Image (cartoon, rainbow, N blue to C red):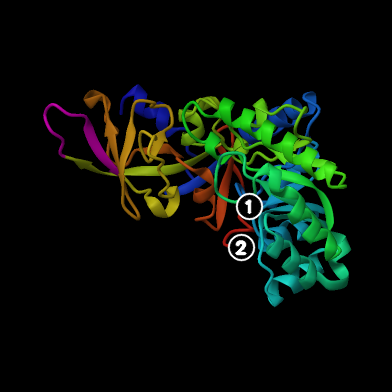
Amino acid sequence: MSDHQETAAVTIPQEIDTPDIMIDVDILDRNIERMASAVRARGLGLRPHAKTHKIPEIAARQMAAGASGLTVATIGEAEVFAASGVDNLFIAYPLWMSPQKAGRLQRLSQTAQIAVGVDSEDGATALGSAMGSAAPSISVLVEVDSGHHRSGVHPESVAPVAEAAARTGLKVSGVFTFPGHSYAPGMPVEAAMQEQQALNRASEVLTAAGFHATCRSGGSTPTAMLTGNSAATEVRPGVYVFGDAQQLELERCAAEDIALTVAATVVSHHAAPADGPARFIIDAGSKVLGSDRPAWASGFGRVMDHPDARITALSEHHATVEWPEPDTVPAIGQRLRVIPNHVCLAVNLVDDVAVVRGGELVDRWVVAARGKNK
């Protein structure tokens, strides 16, 4: 085995079998503290999006670092984190109230401060009506479309949604947006500017309609460090705790900021053209890496410590890696660390994760909110 191979191999503790998700807790803690300090210095609140990690131990670290609460995607995620002791939660998507959801949200509001996103008069009316006497305990933020064009209303149209919510007894706390179009090359700065314009205008419209918009919430991981307090009062980054191949390619993090990797083993060598890169197969496919690949991404993930290698194809349990240096192709049986493209998907595919420090396995954490999709 070459020196190159030995360096890569010793990063994965022997107790870990592959494929397995590993979290370097020292890098994780550094990422959490860096974001908390940077946001605090800008005069903003931090409400991290917990759909990225779904792990109570990480939520506790974020809260200890100064987060005001957590953002979640679903009532199910909110239930998990409320049970772990987080008492301030924002469900940052429009919900349509079924009787089942209404009952769960009513119970949840008895143990935690809950806010919910709304972006239509019908949705706001249904939410307030379903909550009944519990409606005053629920805050709502009107979602504004700042350029991502997924959900959210135009900034000029926030007042009717807020008025519908207020008529049913819900507390209107402000506005929020998700600058999801920041997840593309060259877009974070422009998306942050559009976010600021949308939040400012929506807040002005709400104020003119008689509402006191105390919360203006924005900021994804690519834009959180670009968000100014002239528009927002808080940001909601999620991926920053781990980093991933998308953030690496967008230059929103560096390799040394990657806290989560997938331990994988080379299981096969593939015959390659004489004039092309070497190819081999690892035992980590879409069922542990996730299959997300934006059109601009250069592969289905990256290999840690080997920035020129590319994952060019995924099967369910295997991946094809193109290796540019034929003389250093990893041997069958060698273990590598792989950086998933979209870390949120990868975490949701496993029951628990390995926690490592200094190359040693120190713990395993349960992905407690895995599969909580409703």
Residue 277 image offset from top left, x and y in percent? 21, 29
Mark 1 is surrounded, within 10 Å at the Cα level, by few (under 14), some (14 to 19) or many (20 or more) other residues, namely many
Q: Does the magenta portion include 276?
A: yes
Residue depicted at x 41% and y 55%: 287
Q: Horizontally, is 322 left or right of 69 in the view?
A: left
Q: CA distance from mark 1 to mark 2?
A: 9 Å
Q: Are marks 1 and 2 in contact (CB under 8 Å)?
A: yes
The type of residue carrying mark 1 is Lys
Between residues 104 and 265, which one lies in front from this camera angle?
104
Q: Which mark is residue 54?
A: 1
The quarter holding residue 179 reads: top right
Q: Nearer the viewer, mark 1 or mark 2?
A: 2
Residue depicted at x 66% and y 36%: 219
Residue 104 image offset from top left, x and y in percent? 74, 70
Q: Which mark is residue 138?
A: none
Q: Does the magenta portion include 172?
A: no
Task: Identify the secondary structure beneath mark 2.
Answer: loop
Residue 283 image offset from top left, x and y in percent? 35, 48
Between residues 148 and 355, which one lies in front from this camera angle?
148
Mark 1 or mark 2, which has the lower sequence index? 1
Q: Horizontally, is 151 left or right of 302 in the view?
A: right
The quarter holding residue 202 reads: top right
Quarter of the rendering occupied by the C terminus: bottom right
**What secondary structure predominates along the stretch shown in magenta?**
loop
Residue 14 image offset from top left, x and y in percent? 47, 42
Q: Which residues are magenta?
A: 271-281
The type of residue carrying mark 2 is Lys
Q: Which residue carries the number 2 mark?
A: 372
